[in-house]
Amino acid sequence: MVVKAEKAVSMREEIGDQSGTSTPLNQHFVLVHGMSGGGWCWYKIRCLMESSGYKVSCIDLKSAGIDQSHADSVLSFDDYNQPLMDFLSALPENEQVILVGHSAGGLSVTQACHKFAKKIHLAVYVAATMLKLGYLTDEDLKDGVPDLSEYGDVYQLGFGLGQDKPPTSALVKKEFLRKIVYPLSPHEDSTLAAMLLRPAPILALTSARFRDEGEVEKVPRVYIRTRHDSVVKAEQQEAMIKRWSPLGVYELDSDHSPFFSTPFLLFGLLLKAAAFDVGCNYTCH
């Protein structure tokens, strides 16, 4: 069973009433973008959270956002995800964060859970790739890699290792963005995205593989499904949820980018997830 977003919209008021402070629960949200995005894509969520007293950090991964690296030079997932690893490493030992990953940002969240379990209070996957060990098998690739072939030739590819080698970067062409990624989002947001999206290091992303040393299961996880998603499709999200079951599943009537299309509902769900006593097993009904 899933929790519908409508049930979460009042969570802001509920938590504010319970805390009685301007910094509810002293919670620190760390938001991680997906393929081609950047910390900028969370601007609505960041505004809502900071206005409500939460601490928020938005990460730019390697070659994303304002990071100066070029995607064609980022050839390993460890290199791509290093900014998040550095951020978590620099946190005080006694500080925990709520780590939120969108789309391919789920891979970044999972690696962080393997390496920094003690510093993560909760991992939240928003229409995200949720694979315990990354891309190890054909099934992992089927469930976790977006298949946009039905739309035709949608990617602008980069070949940093040479034209005879696999592509090293990819960016969805501007003429496809609205239809595929942002169909339910405000036009001004899809216009902004078309101006700011950068090529993603797909060779690095698809090489993401993690060693299981027992730490990752110590981090509670929740998944937020997006019902009208043309990128990480509903059957892919469901397959990943079944294979590596999170403690809770929520659902949004959203496209692939709920931080644009349903920001208030996403904000409410993030607070609802964070409000649980995630140290205990629970099921959302």
Image (spheres, rainbow, N blue to C red):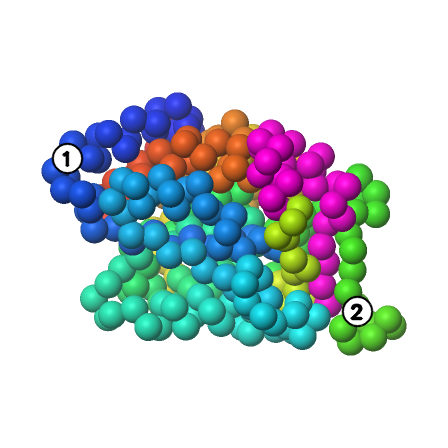
Residue occupying the far left of the picture: 20
Write down the residue under mark 2. 159
Callout 1: SS: helix
Residue occupying the far right of the picture: 164
What residue is rendered at 33% in x and 43% in y?
Answer: 49
- Amino acid type at image mark 2: Phe
> Which mark is drawn over residue 18?
1
Give the quadrant of residue 14: top left
Q: Answer left or right for 171 relative to 225.
A: right
Q: How would you rate the neighbour count of disc 1 (Cα within 10 Å): few for under 14, some for 14-19, many for 20 or more? A: few
- If you read the primary sequence from the N terminus, does the residue marked by circle 2 or circle 1 appear first? 1
Callout 2: SS: loop
Query: Considering the image in quadrants, where does the N terminus appear?
Result: top left
Is 237 a magenta residue?
Answer: no
Is 188 a magenta residue?
Answer: yes
Q: Looking at the image, which is closer to me, 167 or 143?
A: 167
- Residue 60 to residue 227: above or below: below
Which range is magenta?
A: 168-193
Please indicate, yes or no, whether residue 238 appears anywhere in the rendered image: no
Q: Looking at the image, which is closer to me, 95 or 122?
A: 95
- Amino acid type at image mark 1: Gln
Q: Answer left or right for 104 relative to 120.
A: right
